[in-house]
Image (cartoon, grey):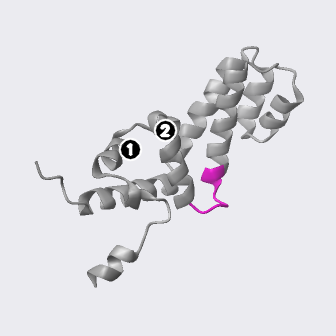
Amino acid sequence: MNEVVECIKCICGCNELSRDRIKEILCKRIHGFLSDEAAVDMFKKFIPANSITHRDIANIQRAKKYLEMDIDTDSDELEEFAEDLEEHLEDELKTNSNTKEALERVIFEYSKKIESSKDYENFKANLREKYTSRPRRKT
């Protein structure tokens, strides 16, 4: 039976992680978690491809990209991005003269949304289970 269980691999790739790395991911706050590219990639593999959480992650990643680019506030690309957001965030991005502030708000709002999602809760529970099932290193 143990051989069968050992053959079952988690789709997110957490089986490849050390106990310490799993603990590191579990201890991160949402903003740190979302800044950890490897952790986000695992999370995206864990959740259904058509989930709202995937869209929310994409919105955060686009907002971060635009922050780094110092994008022109009148660009079609930014306008298109704004239209993909929830209405109150779209309005803020279109009307706020401080684009950087509006993009940071987008990141903050979607981060909170992900943190409270069932997808994130289930992912963290899966990691906790993997963490507790891994033997501790002998010193």
Instruction: Identify the secondary structure beneath mark 1.
Output: helix
Magenta run includes residue 127: no
Residue under pointer 2: 36
Which quadrant holds residue 58?
top right
Residue under pointer 1: 25
For residue 33, above or below residue 137 = above
Which quadrant holds residue 9?
bottom left
Indicate the amino acid at tag 2: Asp
Q: Residue furthest front?
A: 139
Magenta run includes residue 49: yes
Magenta span main SS: loop
Which quadrant holds residue 7?
bottom left
**At x 60% / y 63%, what residue is drawn?**
48
Whether residue 99 sits left or right of residue 11 in the image: it is: right
Q: Residue furthest bottom?
A: 1
For residue 109, above or below residue 120 = above
Indicate the amino acid at tag 1: Ile
Marks 1 and 2, how far apart at CA: 8 Å
**At x 51% / y 53%, what residue is drawn?**
43
x, y percentage for residue 4? 34, 82
Which portion, as a residue range, is magenta?
A: 47-54
Whether residue 67 sits left or right of residue 125 in the image: it is: right
x, y percentage for residue 75? 87, 25
Instruction: Identify the secondary structure beneath mark 2.
Output: loop
**At x 49% / y 60%, what residue is drawn?**
12
- Mark 1 residue crowding within 10 angstroms, few (<14) / some (14–19) / many (20+): some
Whether residue 98 sits left or right of residue 11 in the image: it is: right
Quadrant containing the N terminus is bottom left
Q: Are marks 1 and 2 in contact (CB under 8 Å)?
A: yes
